[in-house]
Amino acid sequence: MNVRALARWILGAAIASAVMASAGAADIVIGQVAPLTGLEAKQGLGYAAGLRLAFDSVNKQGGVNGNTFTLVRADDHNEPASTVEQTRKLVAEQRPFVLAGYSGSRNLAALLASGILDQQRLALVGYRTTGIPPSHPLLFNVRVDIRDELAKLTEHLATLGITRLGLLHEAGADAVVAAADEAAGRAKAAFVIRASYAPDSRSAGPLVAAFLKTPPQAIIMVANGTTTAAFIKLGRSGPAIPACWNESPQHSKQGSRCPTNRRTPLMALSRSSWRRSIRAGSRS
């Protein structure tokens, strides 16, 4: 998640908009509908904390041309229907300048299908999903595209001689699977096993068992925080298996000292690194 880039985009858009050209200064509302409670709350809360820090800093300096920024949030409990309902309510009551900080593949799909963005000519800037959303003129990403992440990771692993890969993904994420296969092909690697989880699933047992049955050299995970944490926790307590890449550092925090490389959004560990991780965890 690149909250700093997201805040810069919003502030820049506000400066360039007709809102800033109005005669009197105004309080510009930024709307966020995301999981603020429950297992996926760290996603929504992380976005909100970063945005508020950026807006507070600007507001303390007098805003932009006298205009200040306010973040208005609503909790969708990670339920797609609630994402749409809460967005409609927020738009009607708060009339936000832009939406930001949404989370969840199904949630984003439901929002796009609802037509709210098109009807209101309202942009959504910055979101976190485990899939590849369709192209939309009012949808703006501020982080590295999953396709690019997969390409860079498989290329790097191939230079280390790691070409037998595993893929863990959300069920129905066909675009992710296709992008992963394309990236692996270019890197002269291959996915020897794939495993998927239902969006509402909290069980990682069958996933770990699948990778133990057909062990790859490394596993690439395109997964939500709950699944990532459960998979790593269960994997650490059993036989050694390769560890996985995480899309955002907070997933690693949930994963009980899962090794992480905070300089890159992707992480993959070989089998030996995974064993070292388990040994380190058992000593602490």
Image (cartoon, grey):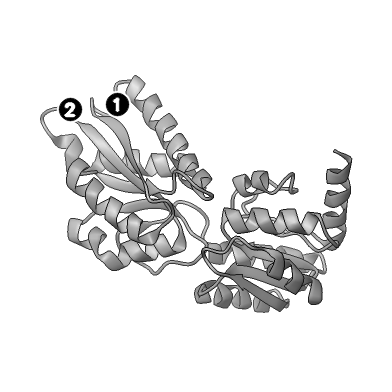
Q: Which residue is mark 2?
A: 25
Residue for point 52% across, 50% down: 40
Picture quadrant where residue 250 is located: top right
Compared with residue 68, is residue 165 higher up or lower down, i.e. above or below? Answer: below
Give, as a three-letter code, the residue at label 2. Answer: Ala
> In the rendering, which numbered label is found on residue 178?
none
x and y percentages locating residue 133 in the rendered image = 43, 66
Neighbour tally class for label 2: few under 14, some 14-19, many 20 plus, Cα within 10 Å: some
x and y percentages locating residue 127 in the rendered image = 43, 53
**Nearer-the-camera pick, 106 or 218:** 106
Residue for point 30% across, 33% down: 70
Position of 190 with respect to 40 (left or right) is: right
Picture quadrant where residue 56 is located: top left
Position of 82 with respect to 131 (left or right) is: left
**Nearer-the-camera pick, 266 or 244:** 244
Q: Which residue is mark 1?
A: 63
Residue 6 visible from this viewpoint:
yes
Position of 32 with respect to 43 (left or right) is: left
Give, as a three-letter code, the residue at label 1. Answer: Gly
Residue for point 75% across, 48% down: 259
